[in-house]
Amino acid sequence: MRYKVRVGVIAENATEVGARGYAVAVHGRTVVVHYGKIEVTGSGTSKFHWKRTPKPYPYPCSTPKAARAKARELVRKQLQQNSKGSYQLLPKDVRIRQPIQAEQD
């Protein structure tokens, strides 16, 4: 699964700044999309964490080949430059990690 991120100006946010993550996975005949807010930590080598566990959005397809084509289409749409900005593909070895749990006293 390759991850995509969008960090920067997001006009829909009250502060007009934000970070979003997007992931697409193919499981047999089903394409599963996860997206949501992310947190970027670290300097130099950044780490990405979901703000909360993203809800899966399934796209059932008729065949595994159709599922792979749908996944490519969804990724291509997110990477296209548009008026709202676009996602950037993370390197293959970088992933969006599970949410950081708040420290309990």
Image (tube, grey):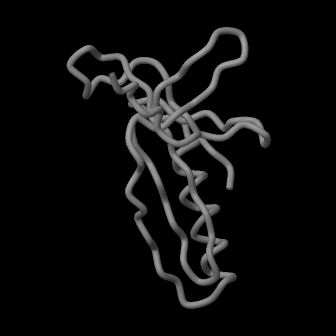
Q: Position of residue 88 (x, y in %)?
A: 61, 33
Q: Residue at x 30, y 17 (%)?
A: 16
Task: Give the residue drawn at x 57%, y 30%.
Answer: 48
Name the residue at 26% across, 14% down.
15
* Res 80 → quadrant: top right
Q: Quadrant of the N terminus?
A: bottom right
Position of 92 with respect to 77 (left or right) is right
**Residue 65 at x, y percent in the picture:** 69, 82
Query: Toward the viewer: 97 or 78?
Result: 97
Image point (58%, 40%), residue name: 97
Q: Position of residue 47 (x, y in %)?
A: 63, 26
Provide residue 61's location: percent of width, then percent of height.
52, 83
Q: Residue furthest left?
A: 14
Compared with residue 16, is residue 23 higher up or lower down, i.e. above or below?
A: below
Q: Reply above or below: 94 against 45.
A: below
Q: Is residue 9 above or below residue 56?
A: above
Which is nearer the eye, 9 or 29? 29
